[in-house]
Image (cartoon, helix red, strand yellow):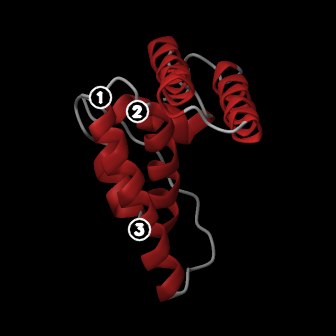
Amino acid sequence: MPHTVSFSSRPPLSPISRVVLLGFGGFNFVLGAVGLVLPVLPTTVFWIVAIGCFSRASPQLAARLVAHPRFGRPFADWLACGAIDRRGKVFAIGGMGLSVLSATLLLDPAGWLLGVLGIAWISASVYLATRPDYCPIV
């Protein structure tokens, strides 16, 4: 069953802004797709950025993603009320944690860089953890 989300009307974007948003959204969408098979890439985080870019630059593309039978519901929940299901949160936070741990063990980063990575992981994790688990509207 397709999910529907209405995209609020905003002032039109300039062609350059539209291309930049589509490119950045596409890049994040591909990273999220790679994250489906590589456990160290968090699909959820990249797809949140992608659907945000697509909803602004190409509402038709965002509507196609929302209508997808398998992945549409999470997109619709995010666009409607910023909700991320519990499984998505666990995988995103865990994947980012594995990435920071891998970087720490394999790359031996400088102390300041390790601090930046840790702060970024904690910040993103807190943000994701505080999102609602479901969206009763959609």
**Residue in front for this viewpoint, 64 or 138:** 64
- Name the secondary structure under disc 2: loop
Q: Is residue 124 above or below residue 52?
A: above
- First in sequence, mark 3 or 2: give its number: 3
122 sits to left or right of 11: right
Tell me the CA gap for discs 1 and 3. Answer: 24 Å
Q: Is residue 135 visible?
A: no
Q: Please give the residue where the numbered disc 3 appears in the rendered image.
A: 22
Q: What is the crowding at mark 2: few (fewer than 14 residues within 10 Å), some, or many (at least 20)?
A: many
Q: Is the Cβ of the residue at disc 1 closer than 8 Å to that at disc 2? A: yes
Q: Please give the residue where the numbered disc 1 appears in the rendered image.
A: 38
Image mark for residue 27: none
Q: Position of residue 57 (x, y in %)?
A: 47, 69
Q: Is residue 87 above or below residue 125?
A: above
Q: Amino acid at mark 1?
A: Leu
Q: Position of residue 13 (x, y in %)?
A: 56, 80
Q: Position of residue 114 (x, y in %)?
A: 69, 33
- Name the secondary structure under disc 1: loop
